[in-house]
Amino acid sequence: MEMEQKHTCASICDQLPTLSSNHPWLVDHNLEEDDNRDHIVYTMRDPPTQRRCRIPSPLGRRIRGCFYGWVILSNHPHNDMWSLWNPETSKIICLPRLITEYAVLCSDTYGVFASGTIQQCCLSSPPDDPGSIFMVTAAEYTLFFCRLDCKRKRLKWVEMSYAQQMRSIAGCDSILYCLTCCNGNVYALNNVPGNRVVIHLDIVVKDKGIVISLLPCLKLPAFYEYRYMYDCPNSVVFLKGCCTELFCIKLGLNKRGHVEKQSFGGVCVFKLDMTNKRWEQVEDLNDATFFLDLAHDCSAFYSPTIASELGGYVHFLDKSAKVTYSFDFKNKTIALSSMPSLVLPTKLFGCRQQGEPGEIKSQQENEVVVRDDEVDSNNMSLATREENIGSRLLNIPLDVLKTIMGFCVGIEYLNFRATCKLCHLAAPMIRWSKGGRLQNYSLASPWLMMLDKDRGVISFTDPKFGDKYFIKTPQELIGNVQIHCSMGGWLLIRRHDGPLMFFNPFTSDTRELPFAPYFDTYCFSAPPTASDCMVVGFTTRTEWHVYVHFVARELSWRRFHLKYCCDSHTLHFATRYGKNLYALYNNGGVGFIDTGNLVYTGVRGLTIAGNLDYVWREGPRSSCVSPKQSFLTKCDQQLLLVIVGEFGECVEVFKLNDSTKWEKTESLGRHAIYICGKACLCVEAKMPEMANKIYFPRIHSENRKIVFYSLTTRRYHTFNGQDIEESFGDFMGTKHYIDPHVWIEPSWS
């Protein structure tokens, strides 16, 4: 069969002359619609842009990849008819039919997601190259390839088994995945746990045939050393080449006990130094962007240079093909956006979402620093505000202005200080540890604390005004730090392979605890300065145990065996309430222990103190149909359970009556709840407008304000000073931090 080249009616450039090449795009390929409809080209700009065009793909064709500007199409789900289409020149190359007899290979946890016999595909070089090879991987360790030589009278598929070659490399049977091309070569990965290597597919084109040899190239980089990856056991690795660069991307996925599905944990990117054959960690993507497709075949795409305002992101389409996650590589935030119904299912060619600017203006140890661009609620620049009000302030003598500033504390002090240069001179920088007036200031609410490990600072965001303050991270906390829970201005944290400790970020005070194993969930009953502070941890990996430590009374932990526990569940959000210790099951149930008999014994060393009866009760019936998260907290004289849908589409609050029955509540009264993955705080609101709301560790993508849910309106909003603005129904259009973050109540003791 001769290689068939056709010209379509018009190229994408002709149909969409206004579509900039600097903005990568997505295109739909709905397999169920008729072939005469227009396709949708969609760019992830802000706001999203849609264009209509006609793509020459017969009914049922699916986009499988893009190499050297050529789009790969196959008929789904049979994958026996393949073609290559160039959207700029409108050429299309049809390949002969590919018939296979292998069984379907199921997906595994190492990134091989297949639909049908054919796994993945790759184009070794542009089709006009005499040595260009198009190849696809199949089940049973088989590779099919076709030489795209336009001078050849007949094209044919050649079948090749690579099982024996792979055994010599990996020591066992292994499949190829993540095929990619770089610098004229084709590379892939094997899927052997603990022994995954980059494999070079050495292609030698001869007159009488083609010889493909599998050669081990190098091992993958040590992802476990990266600050996100040690806590992401169920991650996906991508290999992507572009021109002379070869990248290895790891998408971190973790499955928490309180989340009924895998959640995003982080992204790390490495680039191969071709000269030294060594992986180098990529610290800044600059104007480049990656986009990963989990919905179809785990393919990866890379654009080295796009519009500068859109650079520096890693986007990925989730398995449902309904939600796109956009990871800001610089600011370490993850944003959600829903795919328009007109473009489902889709294949990612590229996407971009505008990032937020933000540089730390200055960093001094234990000093409060305010970002000028976030103080003014009307988003005025410092120069604009000086022009508007500076003339009046300059008429006030400096000594008088200093006296006025002496009556300002907290947020007012920092806002006034950032107003103009004169106020900046009249209000010196104040150390938190010597804060004076700041310590006596009655702050309105808990703040969202974020530990920025790249820049070595701790930031605090006011949920009402949106002001952000920075302090320098203490030296002993620099590195991989996990935040486990928060209470009374203190955090329970652990450095990777380090001790469990208390940390007060407002005073930089740290207090190490005796050695303890890693727990599934943590809680403490009071700040470590209190005489009755009790720290509790659960382990459920083999047998179920609860560890108890009285901070002020004992020098060790006591371990109790929990009876009547089901090994199929894990625990999270341990909460001390009254004389009982409560914890959530991952299936929504609640268990509790009577801790009234846990008294000081004066023992030293780890003591096995017998058995404890653990009572389990079913959780409330929730109307949420999607995967959900559950949060447990105590509020005044009640125990509350908050249930939140996967994307925030459902929020419910239940209270426990008489320790036996859950009752749905529609109001928190004067209280407000602050929830995140590590803490759930319920406090009395200091301002009436902050009451009866649930605050999330999420930021609105446009106004960069903290997002909250109102139990009165049953909608999400943000604050604009004293006013409430924005009204939306879920988490789409919001972002949250990947760095360790938690809600914390300010405390200087």
Image (tube, rainbow, N blue to C red):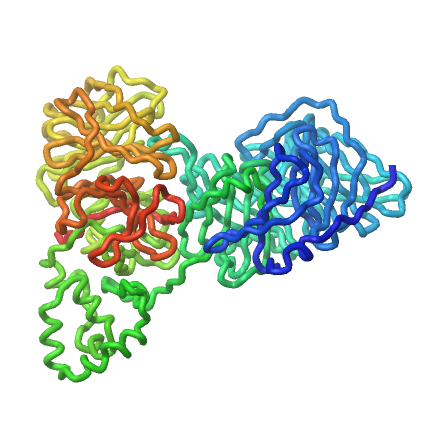
Q: Is residue 379 above or below residue 141?
A: below
* Residue drawn where x is 39% and y is 56% of the image: 454
Residue 313 at what x, y percent from top left?
49, 53
Q: Residue 279: tell me if it is visible.
A: no
Q: Is 191 in front, or is 479? A: 191
Q: Is residue 233 above or below residue 334?
A: above
Residue at the (19%, 46%) spot, across then down: 490
The image shows residue 609, relative to residue 57, as above or below, that is above
Whether residue 161 is visible to the viewer of this picture, yes or no, is yes
| Observer-nearest of 424 and 491 | 424
Residue drawn at x 51%, y 55% as measured from the top left: 282
- Of 34 and 66, nearer the camera is 34
All told, the count of numbered labels is 0
Q: Is residue 264 above or below residue 620?
A: below
Residue projecting furthest to the front: 36
Relative to residue 226, is residue 404 drawn left or right?
Answer: left
Q: Is residue 263 left or right of residue 523?
A: right
Residue 379, image x, y percentages: 32, 65
Q: Quarter-wise, where is residue 330 in the image?
A: bottom left
Q: Quadrant of the N terminus?
A: top right
| Location of residue 104 in the rendering, given as x and y in whole percent from the top left corner | 64, 24
- Is 155 on the left-hand or right-hand side of 192? right
Which residue is drawn at the image coordinates 46% and 43% (left, top)? 338
